[in-house]
Image: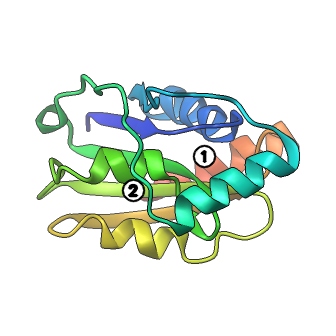
Amino acid sequence: MKAVVIYYSYEGNCALIAEILKTALSADVFEIKTLNEKKRTGFFLYLWGGAQAIFHKKPAIHPVSADLNAYDLIILGSPVWAGSPTPAIVSFLADGKISGKKLALFCCHGGGMGKALAKLKALLPGNTIISEADFKYPAKGDRAALKQKIDEWVKTLK
């Protein structure tokens, strides 16, 4: 099975999950990056990020060079902003280039995922979602426990 992980990571949480998945699945990995990646921190990050998600912003992103037809499994990862997937992921999915594929979804959050996975699934009609996972503050927790959780999730993907 040839797998690819495509993710957006603002604070490094989804990047950590993507790197562990890369090793566990021998997957290719592509990070979505916005053209204007101004870093915000603290309260301003939550205010700005929440507003971006609530108002359904679709920021311009750098092209992702992956040939999605070359993969048996596509894993998409997003932080949760205001109970939604990030606008960068929404921008990536806006062109509808993922269709008829087998997908797995994950999100990273700091307190609750809200309806992020359900909203992400709604952006992926015509695909088969085989598995979902969520990770609370993965970069701040016990790395061994995180790896074990991901290893268990990977078993559902094979």
Q: The disc labelled 1 sits on which kind of residue?
A: Asp
Residue 56 x %, y %: 44, 63
Q: Amino acid at mark 2?
A: Ala
Residue toward you, 41 or 102? 41
Lateral position of residue 107 relative to residue 43, left or right: left
Identify the residue shown where x is 56% and y is 28%: 37
Q: Residue at x 75, y 46 (%)?
A: 45
- For discs 2 and 1, the disc positioned in front in the rendered view: 2
Residue 11 visible in the picture? yes
> Which residue is located at x 11 percent, y 58 percent?
100
Left or right: residue 10 versus residue 144 is left
Looking at this view, is 26 or 17 the one in front? 17
Q: Badge 1, how many Cα within 10 Å: few under 14, some, many 20+?
A: some
Q: Which quarter of the picture shows residue 20?
A: top right
Above/below status of 25 relative to 44:
above
Residue corresponding to mark 2:
104
Question: Real-space Cα distance between discs 2 and 1?
Answer: 14 Å
Left or right: where 11 falls relative to 22? right
Q: Which residue is mark 1?
A: 151
Give the structural element (helix, strand or loop) at label 2: strand
Numbered disc 1: secondary structure: helix
> Coloring scheme of the render?
rainbow
Q: How many marks?
A: 2
**Labels 2 and 1: the sequence-earlier one:** 2
Q: Residue at x 16, y 29 (%)?
A: 67
- Where residue 112 sits: x, y (%)? 73, 70
Residue 1: x %, y % from top left: 26, 38
